[in-house]
Image (cartoon, grey):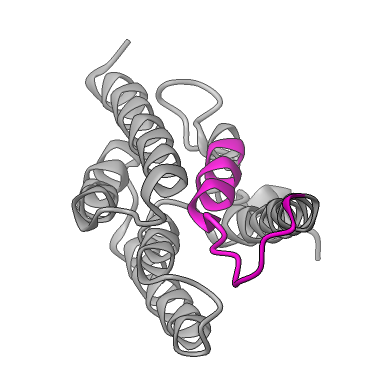
Amino acid sequence: MGWNALAIVGLVMVLGALLLAAGIEDVRTREIANAKNAAIALLAPLWWWALALGWGDVGVQLLVAAVVFAVFVGAFAAGWMGGGDVKMIAALALWLPLGSLVDMLMVMAVLGGAITVLMMIDQRRRRVAGTIEVPYGVAIAAAALLALPAILPATPDAPSAATARPAASQTRS
């Protein structure tokens, strides 16, 4: 097993631990610490290095992350999400190729909706008035954890299916 394979395994384990910690923290406090989101974002360049991404691919990751951040800042401004949630989604956009990111966002939306409905049912059952503060970080973390296997390389020294480019001989005319 080469150094890049060890780096990939180690980075995925650290990312998984950060996601679990963020989800637990969001349930307990309804906040996600900036340090966790910063760690996720700052580990992304090591991820790119371990996958041997080229400058073009890195540029795409940065552009997609900027667009994702801008879109979700709008959700924050509308009061639909917390700032920690927005930062975590943008940090994860640095790790996930576009297809995997879209998959993660779809799963996140479904899980977030399910958590919201369950919290509304619980609130009604307990006959409590007020606004529900949904720990959306749980849905984000769970969706990201589910997306991780799709971005792992098939073999330690091969690019992942999500980042692999088709060979010229494999493309159709």
Could you tell whether 149 is left or right of 52 in the image? Answer: right
Q: Which residue is depicted at the point 36% across and 22% down?
A: 9
In the displayed orientation, state which residue is furthest to the front: 127
Q: Position of residue 50 (x, y in %)?
A: 28, 36
**Considering only vertical position in the picture, is 156 above or below 54?**
above
Closer to the camera in the image, 86 or 126: 126
Q: Which residue is depicted at the point 50% across and 32% down?
A: 152
Q: Position of residue 90 (x, y in %)?
A: 40, 66
Q: Which residues are magenta?
A: 126-146
Q: Which residue is depicted at the point 42% across and 49% down?
A: 26
**Considering only vertical position in the picture, is 144 above or below 37?**
above
**Considering only vertical position in the picture, is 63 above or below 52?**
below
Could you tell whether 102 is left or right of 153 in the image? Answer: right
Q: Position of residue 2 (x, y in %)?
A: 27, 16
Q: Which residue is depicted at the point 47% across and 45% down?
A: 27
Q: Position of residue 15 (x, y in %)?
A: 35, 36
Closer to the camera in the image, 68 or 166: 68
Residue 110 image-quadrant placement: bottom right
> Looking at the figure, which quarter contains the C terminus?
bottom right
